[in-house]
Image (cartoon, rainbow, N blue to C red):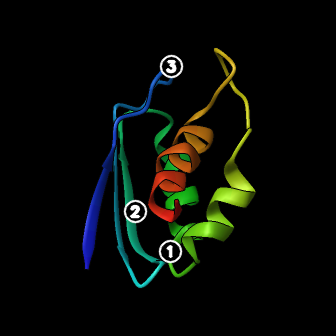
């Protein structure tokens, strides 16, 4: 299993921890931000293919032209290049 740390920019969250194996997200957690919403997102993406998570979350906006889900997608996108 591989752990990826994403440092989001322009959001309330400060750190995203994604454990993945063979292109599938095994576990995800986010430090700071809207706790309930981010826990929900993390639970929903566990077991999903990284590419599908990127497709669903990329481009969602909240503030500053980005959002926590968008920042997660941007970080995960680097794993599938």
Q: Secondary structure at mark 1?
A: loop
Return the residue at label 3: 10
Which mark is drawn over residue 28?
Answer: 2
Which mark is drawn over residue 69?
Answer: none
Query: What's the distance in space between the residues labelled 2 and 1, CA to CA?
Result: 7 Å
As displayed, is residue 5 above or below residue 51?
A: above
Q: Secondary structure at mark 3?
A: loop
As displayed, is residue 51 above or below residue 78?
A: below
Which x, y percent locates residue 21?
Answer: 36, 81
Return the residue at label 1: 46
Query: What's the distance in space between the residues labelled 2 and 3, CA to CA?
Result: 20 Å
Disc 2 and disc 1 in contact, CB within 8 angstroms? yes
Q: Nearer the viewer, mark 3 or mark 1?
A: 3
Q: Front-most of 56 and 40?
A: 56
Left/right of residue 31 with respect to residue 55 in the rendered view: left
Q: Residue at x 52, y 64 (%)?
A: 80
N-terminal-most mark, 2 or 3:
3
Left/right of residue 16 with respect to residue 23 in the rendered view: left
């Amino acid at each position: 299993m591989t752990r990826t740390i994403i440092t989001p920019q322009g959001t309330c969250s400060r750190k995203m921890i994604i454990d993945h194996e063979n292109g599938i997200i095994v576990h995800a957690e986010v430090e700071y931000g809207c706790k309930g919403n981010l826990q929900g997102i993390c639970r929903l993406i566990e077991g999903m293919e990284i590419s599908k998570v990127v497709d669903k979350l990329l481009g969602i906006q909240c503030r500053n032209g980005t959002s926590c889900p968008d920042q997660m997608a941007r970080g995960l996108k680097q794993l599938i290049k």
